[in-house]
Amino acid sequence: MTLRSNLDDVDFRILNIITKNARIPFKEVASEVGISRAAVHQRVNRMIDLEVIVGSGYNINPKKVDFRTCTYIGIFLEKGGLFSEVVERLKLIPEIVECHYTTGQYAIFIKVYAKDNEHLKNILSGQIQKIMGVASTETFISLEESFKRAIPVHS
Amino acid sequence: METNDYLEKAANIDDLDEKILKLITKNARIPFLEVARECGVSGAAIHQRVQRLLNIGVVKGSEFIVSPQKLGYNTCAYMGIYLDKAKYHTQVSEALRKIPEVVECHYTTGQYAIFIKIQTKTNKHLKKIIDDELQEIEGIARTETFISLEMDFKRQVPIK
């Protein structure tokens, strides 16, 4: 189910601005979109209520906080039914920043940030592969993040 | 693109910076006075610290996080891309950048040359992008798609 139809053009224009800069004064958003500041507040609050907006945050550059290795890991399970237990265990490992249940050859697909390859090895063999139900893993190290961005709000 | 990327050093950040980061990565619009109160320093100090974190590149900006589903993006897929020749990497990633539905693009080790994350409205929309846009890019030999049936979690890197 989608609520896309409940959003109008002005909402999309607001989203386009605030998804790129969360601290922009709403007064500035208002003048760019051509409505009052109070109306921007109201619309943002409405989108929060509708859960179109699920939060906000400053984005950390992982390299600057010493996480230099970005890796995707495909996980094979011994049995498909072990999925939720394995996910619960994965959630306890803070270096795992993303976790998906996917189609294709892997049951679970995760994204991991580690300080270096040794740290990655410790997370892999010391933590992930010790989880009951994990049969094997396949690792893809990202040598370069060519780009990363938000979904297109308009299209 | 930074040419000396491989030399990039971790930034010098102290306990106070880490405390601030923990708060502002979870809520970008938190009043700095509130951050100040929680950290036990002045509001001006927080302003200064955040500005410094921005200047040295520890934080790359801020964003409101939208729910893809609520915007009608119901299909999230990862795709491994095989190239005809490895040297096509740059031109292919430039071509991928022009497709707004491709939200992430990595140059990876392992069987794929390029690994992307793609967000589309429906499976049909995904197929259309694969057929009309991805397969049209010169240098792409073939692709392998993993559709995410459920995103269990997504979060930022841990701050000590």
Image: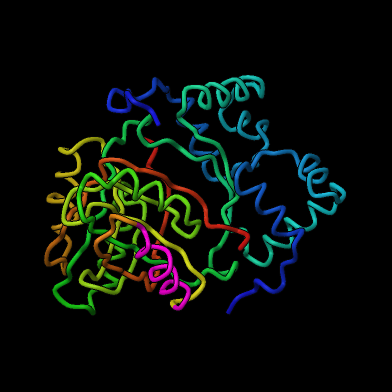
In this view, the residue in front, A137 or B14, is A137
Tell me if residue B131 is in the magenta stretch.
yes
Tell me the quarter of the image containing the C terminus of chain B. top left
Quarter where residue B63 is shown: top right
- Asked if A20 appears above or below B15 in the picture, the reply is below
B75 displayed left or right of A45: left
Among the 4 quarters of the image, the one containing residue A105: bottom left
- In the rendered view, tell whether residue B89 sits above or below residue A74: above
Q: Is residue B6 above or below residue A50?
A: above
User: In the image, residue B130 lies at what x, y percent?
Assistant: 38, 68
* Secondary structure predominantly adopted by residues drawn in magenta: helix
Q: Does residue A74 appear to the left or right of A101 in the view shown?
A: left
Residue at point 69%, 64% (across, down): A49
Picture residue at 57% right of the left edge, 40% below the top: B62
Specify whether residue B157 is painted magenta.
Answer: no
Q: Identify the residue at image location x=60%, y=76%.
A: A2
Rendered location of residue A33, percent (x, y):
79, 49
On the picture, is A73 further left or further right than B53? left
Query: Relative to residue A129, is residue B119 drawn left or right?
Result: right
Q: Residue at x 31, y 62 (%)?
A: B79
Count numbered badges in the picture.
Answer: 0
> For the magenta stretch, what is the residue range?
B124-137
Q: Position of residue A4 (x, y in %)?
A: 65, 71
The image position of residue A99, as x and y in percent, is 34, 60
Assign the N terminus of chain B to one quadrant of the image: top left
- Is B124 or A25 nearer to us in this picture? B124
The type of colouring in the image is: rainbow
